[in-house]
Image: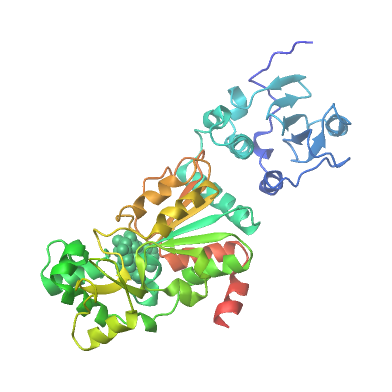
Amino acid sequence: MIVSPRTDCSHIQKEKMYNEEKLKDIMFNKVKCEKCDEKNELWICLYCSLAFCGRYIHSHFKEHYLSNNDHCICISLLDLSMWCYQCMTPGFPDQGSYIESPQLAQYINIISDWKFGTDCPRTLNVLNTMSNEDIYKLKYQNFIELLKNNQFKLIIFMTGAGISTSAGIPDFRSNSGLFNQLMNKYGLQKPEEFFLKETFIKQPELLYDFLKQINFDVYKPTITHLFILYLINKGINCHIITQNIDGLEIKAGIPKEKITFAHGTLKEANCVLCNKKIDIDEIYQCMKNNEIKKCPDCNGPCKPDIILYGENLPNDFYERMKLFEECDLGIVIGTSLKVEPFSCLPYLLKKNSWKLAINKTKIGNFNYNDLTTHELFLQGMTDDIITSILKECGWWDDFNQRFYA
Ligand code: CNA
């Protein structure tokens, strides 16, 4: 028998068709037929959200309909086609009255996205109906569910100075940041010049003077640093690529092999001209004595192993790029994304992987308001946002117990 799909089924129960709990079950493959445990050939009742097997298994959906006559419309989890038992015709959710219900559209979109990926034309067509706020809420909830249920294979944190400001370390570009301080102190037009390789070669005493004033030993890791450790301790695979040189990741207890110091560290030292390794203690000793440590080989000025503008990034940084192939969640946090090549990292994330930006000001160029992407911008202070995530996941008390009790 040939049946034509229709777009104007009058049996749609517009207000009944969205059940968040069931949706989560579907996405986490927890659904099975209510009667026989079938997991593959399933139809979801759009009236009560229960799942039943189709006619190629035991026809339990038909039974369900025969005993509850108004439960007549179902959606197939195999191909997202729909069937109305009262009209005895199929329908297509991206046409006609099927999408007049925003709730239904939302429901179908999420299942479709989950099942076929974000490029699915059905997904792209279905949704023009939701507000940005609803899209945000839905995506955020989706993200929380995935995180809570340990569904991410590899999370890469791309961090900047903003994750350490709550510890008391100023960032570069905020109003109270180091750039403004340096501009006032040294009368610089372009504060970046202070951290140029050439500036250090000509006037190494400037950087020495600057580093002498900051004692990184006194600062403690923030909630954000500890959150990363917390995830790792939960068995969630994480890696951090940080621009920071404050070493708070190590202080938090995050294993070294999980961290890439893109802009170097203060733990080692080298000659800026020939790259010869130097004992860092000798540098600090020279700083104390108001002297400049000179390279024993080439007489060039030596400095801690932090990367200045104009210097190459460590090889590690480039090697870690292959991690992006398996990464399904990238979190860009506390960085203005103004420094290259670090600023290119988020764009290495695969199209279908989740991308989160967390910052007090808007950063990056992501498609935050489109439900067909997995891109989210969480605006606010890093520790506040991380606290909310911990709470949403039901981890906050445990987190506090471990780190602050
Ligand atoms: P940046 O350019 O100063 O950007 C920091 C970003 O974080 C800005 O967009 C701020 O709005 C935002 N921000 C600051 N505090 C918070 C907060 N609590 N919550 C949310 N957002 C916040 O610094 P980047 O890291 O982007 O620039 C890279 C430079 C900074 C690297 O070369 C670092 O070495 C350098 N840096 C490092 C440190 C450190 O190690 N802690 C401190 C200062 C500068």
Residue 139 vertical position relative to residue 382 in the rendered view, above or below: above
Which quadrant of the render holds ligand 1? bottom left
- Camera-nearest residue between 159 and 52: 159
Q: Position of residue 4 (x, y in %)?
A: 70, 13
Q: Residue at x 33, y 57 (%)?
A: 336
Farthest bottom residue in view: 289
Number of residue marks:
0
Q: Is residue 163 left or right of residue 35?
A: left
Q: How is the image coloured?
A: rainbow
Q: Is residue 14 left or right of residue 331?
A: right
Farthest top residue in view: 1
Q: Position of residue 23 (x, y in %)?
A: 68, 44
Q: Is residue 104 left or right of residue 60?
A: left
Q: Residue at x 67, y 38 (%)?
A: 17
For the N terminus, the quadrant is top right
Q: Position of residue 69 (x, y in %)?
A: 82, 30
For the C terminus, the quadrant is bottom right
Residue 63 visible from this viewpoint: yes
- Camera-nearest residue between 255 and 120: 255
Quadrant in the picture for residue 196: bottom left
Residue 309 vertical position relative to residue 280 in the rendered view, above or below: above
Quadrant in the picture for residue 307: bottom left
Q: Position of residue 152 (x, y in %)?
A: 60, 53
- Camera-nearest residue between 356 and 339: 339
Residue 309 vertical position relative to residue 256 in the rendered view, above or below: above
Residue 363 visible from this viewpoint: no
Farthest front residue in view: 297
